[in-house]
Image: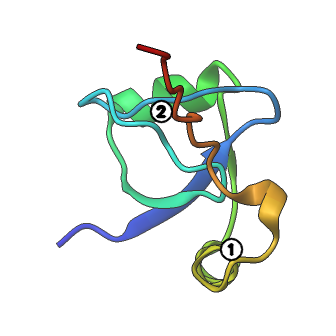
């Protein structure tokens, strides 16, 4: 089993994994590959720690801080 490396998107960057899923702003444990090495070489991702990722995930689950939550699309009602 490969050990995970913890990274998050660099400030102002939207990064997707090999399957097109977004890398969470708080970071994630990654199985290292050439794909992630290229993201690092392009300054798209920055290192973080397991503790920082777990703390951010716990804060999101608890509802804090609000600005760190992913934006949700507003439901638009149309008049008929």
**Quadrant in which the C terminus is drawn:** top left
In the rendered image, the vertical position of residue 56 relative to residue 14, given as above or below: below
* Quadrant assignment, res 26: bottom right
Closer-to-camera residue (69/6):
69
How many marks on residues?
A: 2
Q: How is the image coloured?
A: rainbow
Closer-to-camera residue (61/46):
61
**Quadrant in which the N terminus is drawn:** bottom left
In the rendered image, the vertical position of residue 60 relative to residue 10, given as above or below: below
Few, some or many residues within 10 Å of mark 1 (<14, 14–19, 20+): some
Q: Position of residue 75 (x, y in %)?
A: 52, 34
Extreme front residue here? Answer: 80
66 sits left or right of 63 in the view: right
Residue under the point 57% across and 42% down = 72
Task: Look at the numbered disc 1 and give the secondary structure of its residue.
Answer: helix
Few, some or many residues within 10 Å of mark 2 (<14, 14–19, 20+): few
- Earlier in the chain: of badge 1 and badge 2, it is 2
Closer-to-camera residue (6/3):
6
Q: Position of residue 16 (x, y in %)?
A: 44, 30
Residue under the point 34% across and 30% down = 34
Residue under the point 49% across and 43% down = 23
Q: Which residue is mark 2?
A: 37
Of circles 1 and 2, which is in front? 1
Residue under the point 25% across and 67% down = 2
Task: Look at the numbered disc 2 and give the secondary structure of its residue.
Answer: helix
In the rendered image, the vertical position of residue 47 relative to residue 58, given as above or below: above
Spatial CA span between label 1 and label 2: 24 Å
Q: Position of residue 63 (x, y in %)?
A: 69, 77
Closer-to-camera residue (58/34):
58
Q: Which residue is mark 1?
A: 56
């Amino acid at each position: 089993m490969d050990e995970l490396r913890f990274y998050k998107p660099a400030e102002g960057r939207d990064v997707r994994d090999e399957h097109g899923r977004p890398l969470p702003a708080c970071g994630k444990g990654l199985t290292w590959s050439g794909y992630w090495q290229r993201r690092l070489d392009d300054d798209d991702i920055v290192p973080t720690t397991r503790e920082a990722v777990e703390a951010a995930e716990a804060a999101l689950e608890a509802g804090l801080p609000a600005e760190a939550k992913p934006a949700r699309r507003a439901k638009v009602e149309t008049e008929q």
